[in-house]
Image (cartoon, rainbow, N blue to C red):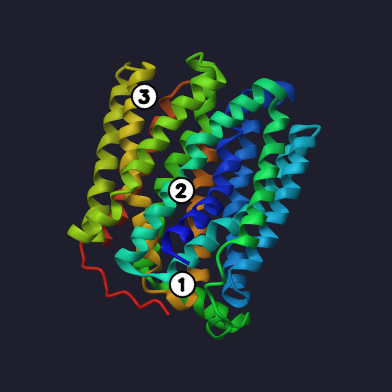
Amino acid sequence: MKSYKYAVVLGLLSAVGPFAIDMYLPALPSISQDLGASTAATQMTLMVFFVTFGVAQIAYGPISDTVGRRKPLFFGLGIFALGGIGCALAPSIEWLIFFRFVQGIGAAACAITPRAIIRDLHTGIAAAKLMSTVMLVFSVAPILAPLIGSTVIVFVGWRGVFAVITLVAVLGILLVALAPPETLPPERRKPLALRPLAQSFGTLFRDLRFLSLTLIAGLGLASFFTFIANASFIYIDHYGMSPLQFSFAFSVNAIGFIGASQFAARLAGRHGFNRVVLTAVTSFMVLSLILLAVTLAGFTELAVLMVGLFLAFACLGLVIPSSMVMALEEHGPIAGVASALGGTIQFLTGAVMVTVASLVFDGTSVPMVAIIAACAVCAFIPARLTLRRPAPAPAAAE
């Protein structure tokens, strides 16, 4: 199958989890009102999803290295669909939180498996090109999902959003059934034994470059998750936007991120991954600190916030996909485990920041911008320490 066909399939599968997040963002204020829940309790539906989405990847990674890439996808999408049905019928915020937990378990399969498939097929610049194309397809989630969600809310309410998310899961199952062949043949699979698995995790935990790159991507994602958790309340409740207007405003940041990601492979081919990521992380930090300073100075107009976030998140479009490719370069034989551990660290980092954001949320943009700036500074430190040294030669795809 041609690379572009893989990119379409992997991009759509990768979008399942973000679709489950982005599509219901415009509904958060409505959910809070309808279920009589506080803002913090409503944000917990996001935080629980992030945690389970991250932790469950630890299980899917080794399993995918043992049974192949397709079976975990079928299982995860089935669990995800059941969770969507439960969310649509949830009678209280507690039940909604529980079924978001179930959804997170299922969606994790769609997070780690596409990255492992990319590593099965390619390394280096070729992997970055495929990852960039996957990100382009993946962009359907952050751009279209809030628009679809706000439209559904207008006609059938927030419960209809989860019915549509369930339909997305069913379509994902059909996509896996009809689309790419298995990329991990039986002769390359690893037996699911405790000692080899522990050795694989030990190898990854001793690899400071892998951990640093994972943390850089994780802090970048955490800053975006912080925006996701707070944006609907800030834009709708604080600035008075309608759910539809919020959807368009949210999409602006997604377009900046995805647009920049398309240049990652080209820039890496010309300047090297290390230089591209280090420059982008530095720019992300500088722009985030400028936005924080401007906000604290009293310039809290919506236009200032949107422009600042657009520029900062565009830098992440170069950081996150490149960091993910770099982290897996040397770990082809255990790509599933490496992708799982990386995803878990990244999403747990995001969950921590979402929790902090919910605790300090005051209805304005100041706490959100401050946390994003803190993430940027924390990402710059491992980038500066790790990426000044030349990257080791990657292991060839097997």
Q: Spatial distance from mark 3 to mark 2, Cα to Cα?
A: 27 Å
Say which of 307 and 1 sits in front. Answer: 1
Q: Which of the labelled discs sits on residue 305, or is there none?
A: 3
Q: Are marks 1 and 3 in contact (CB under 8 Å)?
A: no
Q: Position of residue 308 (x, y in %)?
A: 32, 29
> Which quadrant of the figure contains the C terminus?
bottom left
| Residue under label 1 | 120
Lateral position of residue 322 relative to residue 87, left or right: left
- Relative to 208, say whether 98 is above or below: above
Give the amino acid at mark 2.
Val
Which amino acid, mark 3?
A: Leu
Q: Which kind of residue does numbered mark 1 sit on?
A: Asp
Nearest-to-viewer mark from 1 and 3: 1
Distance in Å between CA atoms under marks 1 and 3 = 40 Å
- CA distance separating discs 1 and 2: 20 Å
Whether residue 146 sits left or right of residue 275 in the image: it is right
Image point 80% across, 36% down: which residue? 89
Q: Which mark is residue 199?
A: none
The residue that mark 2 highlights is 137
Q: Is residue 114 above or below residue 27?
A: below
